[in-house]
Each structure stands twice: as structure tokens, then as C-alpha cells.
Image: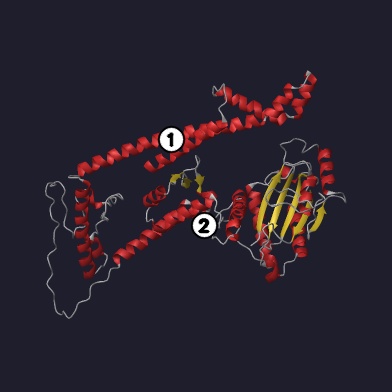
Amino acid sequence: MATLKHINSKNADYGAAEQYLLFEHDEFTMKPVLDETGRLIPREDYRLSTLNCAGEDFAVACMRANLRYGKNQRREDVKSHHYIISFDPRDGPDNGLTVDRAQALGEKFCAEHFPGHQALVCTHPDGHNHSGNIHVHIVINSLRIEEVPFLPYMDRPADTKADCKHRCTDAALRYFKSEVMEMCHREGLYQIDLLNGSKNRVTDREYWAQKKGQAALDKQNAPMIAGGITPRQTKFETNKEKLRQTIRKALATAASFDEFSSLLLREGVAVKESRGRLSYLTPDRTKPITARKLGDDFERAAVFVVLEQNAARAAEKAAAIPESPRHGKTGIQPIKAPQTAPKLVGASSISFASPQAGKLTHSAASPLPTKPDGFAGAPSVQRLVNIEQKMAEGKGRGYERWATMHNLKQMAATLNVYQEYGFTSPEQLEAAVDTAYQEMRQTSGELKALETKLQGKKELQQQVLAYAKTKPARDGLKAQKSEKARAAYRQANESDFIIAEAAARYFKAHGITKLPARKALQAEIEQLISEKDGLYNTY
């Protein structure tokens, strides 16, 4: 199950990449691990080689090429590209994959797909999570130093020329993934489909959030475990993983999109469909999470497939009621005349057709909502069966008798709903629905206004924090005695002053003359989030 990962870097220190590959680094902070004397600790086992560096060190060769062509001199330039090919942990024992063999495959892959680039190829025998997966790092200088032939993933003439830069487009990354799959197939290694997504899509950010959260939870539980106490929670779950479980739980029972939305709203999650795509909004967020970021199982097509399957199973279960066996009765039995539903006193405008017709004269033909939790014994009202249509489809006498009884029960349940809710006519029900709809629209408007206000407060908080972080630089500028010293100091701390000026423009544009206290602002944001959660429940 080899995977391919791409990272671009704007770090002008090419030696930092080589240092990461050769020495131990902390998996959370990505900082080098030092021994007791403050020296770097070399990795236990690795293979390292360079390509197109003319016998020079990788970092020296890259900087020399950049100076020769006048490229990668600005801070915003992408200096290098880092590709990581991770093999399946089973490839070692099952398919004979070794570090040397993986290094050879990495060098061949680099030479074929990144010709003309100075490259560093390094293979490690184990991942940072100690899963035993051999993986190859390929780090290339973004600048191309030789003209190369036109390769399949290239889409413009500049991609072949010297003194031009490598571009990792979506099409190029897709091509590289297909080449990794082909390489594994050719070498007899385990492989998965890298081109058609995954059921659960976990980003690097979520992966590291889970790792850090689990480490913190283990540290918190350690004293309790040592004292013989079983912790309540032993597995850390990210907010996205909790959302995935909530969606799966709703999908397990819902038979329609409306029911699916209703079940999610009970958990405080709002689902929205826009341009054929689904997104999910949780109470602690102002921006929804798209289904694409959660995984293929949560996309619109997959969700509707599950809902259709649930609806089909529910219909089959309702129809597959066995006919009661006859006990010793033989011969022709008389056919009982179908009973009609009793007429509701004081509600003469509500009438039903014969149960054989399977139709209602008013809105009772559609499913009505069950009663709120405060009402005990709320009936479950279902659609009537069109018996004539089912008999024309080939249903038997047993099904006809069951459907007749089913329709009678649903008519009685519909009358009970009308009575228990206090409706005496369909007009009253329609008026109640209209009122509920207007209240929903009003709540939706209040919710949007509250979300806009919350977003503004969060943006203000970001600007206040950014401006506060630049205070040492601003104070240092005031301490300079001459204009020349101030200019030099400003240039040395250019990034801080750019952030401070952007925040000042934001304050001026919004008419803010006095910055709010950070604690008060945080308290206000928490209060708005609490109000938003309440409105979501009401909505």
C-alpha cells in the first residue's frame, strides 16, 4: 500500500532538508533531538545519495545553481519540493523489500520523473510512528539546470527548459501517483488505489492533532493507571472523527435525506447541499466542513446510495409480513366486507376514502411527524398502500388482506394525531405548518446574523493578537535615535511591521480607536458561540 506525499518548501536553507534526513528529529515539534552534550544524534540506519550535483554537497550545488540563473532569491519563492514514497509495512516480510532495494527504486523514480533537477534521495527503514514501513524521501531543487525531454505530466514548453522551475500541479501529482502504483505492481509490492480517494480522508493536520492529543491523554491518564484506576477515556478523537461517527450513526437509520438532516440536527450538526455537494456545520465552527475533507463515504452520491438502500430495506420489511396460517379450516371462506374508518365527531371536513383505494382526501396521505418527546405514546403515521396498484403488479390475496388492515390502522392513527395535537381540520394543520415555517425562517435569519457577528469578532481577535505580537518590534523602532538606524531596524524587522500595518488598516477601516481587552473579547466570543448553539437547537 505505497503512498505518495508532496511538500513544497520556501526555506532557503537547503541544508535543513539534509539535516532532517540524517539526524533524529522530534516527531511533534520537528526539531532536532540533541544528546547530553548538545550534539545532533545521527539516525541509526539510512541510505543517502545525490543526483546532478557534480560531486558537490546538495545544499552547495543548489545555491550555486540559484545564483547562476538568478532564481529562488525572493522569500516567497518555492525553493524545493519534497516527495515521500511510503511502502506497506508488509512489503518487508512478504515481498522481500529492503532498504537498499527501496533506495534503488527511489533513485530510479527520481531520475525518470525529475530529470535536470539537483536531487537528494534518502531511504529510512521505519516511519516516525514505528509502523515498520520503509519510505523514500526525494528532495529536489525547484530550479531545473538542464533541458529535458517533454514528459507526460508536463503541460507547457517551459517545463522542459533549463533555468525554469518545477511545478507540482494536480495533474502532475495524479500522474506521479499512477507511476507509484505501476512501480509497485511491477515490483510485486502491495498497493492501493491512490487515484480514487478514500473512505476516511485524514489530512496531515488532523493526523498530527490526533497524535498530539493521544500523547496528552496518555500523559493525563498515567497517574490514574498507576493508582489502579481505569480512565474514562483512553482513545483521543479529533473533532472531524467525532463528526464522522455522528454522520455514520445517522446514516445507519435514516431512510430519506430529510430524516438524515433531522437526526444530525438533534446532535447539533447542520447538513447543507450546494451545487451537488454536501457540507456539515458543527456548533463550534462558523465555517462548514465539506464532505470532501471527511472522506468519500460522506459525499452526496455515497450518502444517497445508503439512504436508498435503507429505504428499500424498510419497504421490504414492511411488505414481508407472513400470512397467518389456517388452523383446520378448509373450503371456501366468505369474504368479509372491508370496514370503513369511523368518522371523527366535530371534524366533518376530514374524510377518508375506502382503504381499498389507498388514498386520503387530505394531507393524511403523507407521513406526519411523530409527537414531541413530551407526549407519551405518539403514533407513527405511514403512507397508505395503493392496493389496486399492488394487485395489478401480481400481489396475492394474503397481501390484499394485510394492506387493507394496514390502511385501516393508518387512518385511525391519523385521526389520533389530529385529536392529540388539537387539530379539527386540515386548514388548522396547514396554518400550524405555516406558522412553524415562519418561525424557522425568523430563527434562520437570527442565526445568520449571529454567525456574521461571531465571524467579525473572531477576525478582530486575530488582528488584535497579531498586532500585540509586533509590540516588541514597534517599541524597538521607537528606541532608535537616528533616521538611518530606524530605516535599518525597520528593514531587519520587515515582516513584523507588515503585520502591524495590516492590523492598523483593519482597525481604521472598522472605526476601532481603542483595542478591546483580549480576555473580554474571548469571553464575548464564547458567549456568542453559546447563543449560536442554542439557536441551532431551536432551528
Identify the mark nearer the N-term, 2 or 1: 2
Q: Position of residue 159 (x, y in %)?
A: 72, 45
> Does residue 429 appear anywhere in the picture?
yes
How far apart in space, not on screen, are marks 2 and 1 (Cα)? 37 Å
Task: Give the quadrant of the C terminus.
Answer: top left
Task: Answer above or below: position of 297 versus 493.
Answer: below
Q: Indicate the quadrant where residue 404 lies.
A: bottom left
Q: Position of residue 197 (x, y in %)?
A: 56, 55
Secondary structure state at the residue bearing disc 2: loop
- Where residue 232 is drawn, which disc sits there? 2
Q: Indicate the quadrant where residue 163 lies.
A: top right
Most distant residue in the top direction: 482
Which residue is more in the foreground, 264 or 387?
A: 264
Q: Position of residue 329 (x, y in %)?
A: 16, 79
Tell me the kind of residue under disc 1: Lys
- Where residue 448 is drawn, which disc sits there? 1
Tell me the kind of residue under disc 2: Arg
Q: Residue at x 39, y 37 (%)?
A: 444
Q: Position of residue 40 (x, y in %)?
A: 80, 51
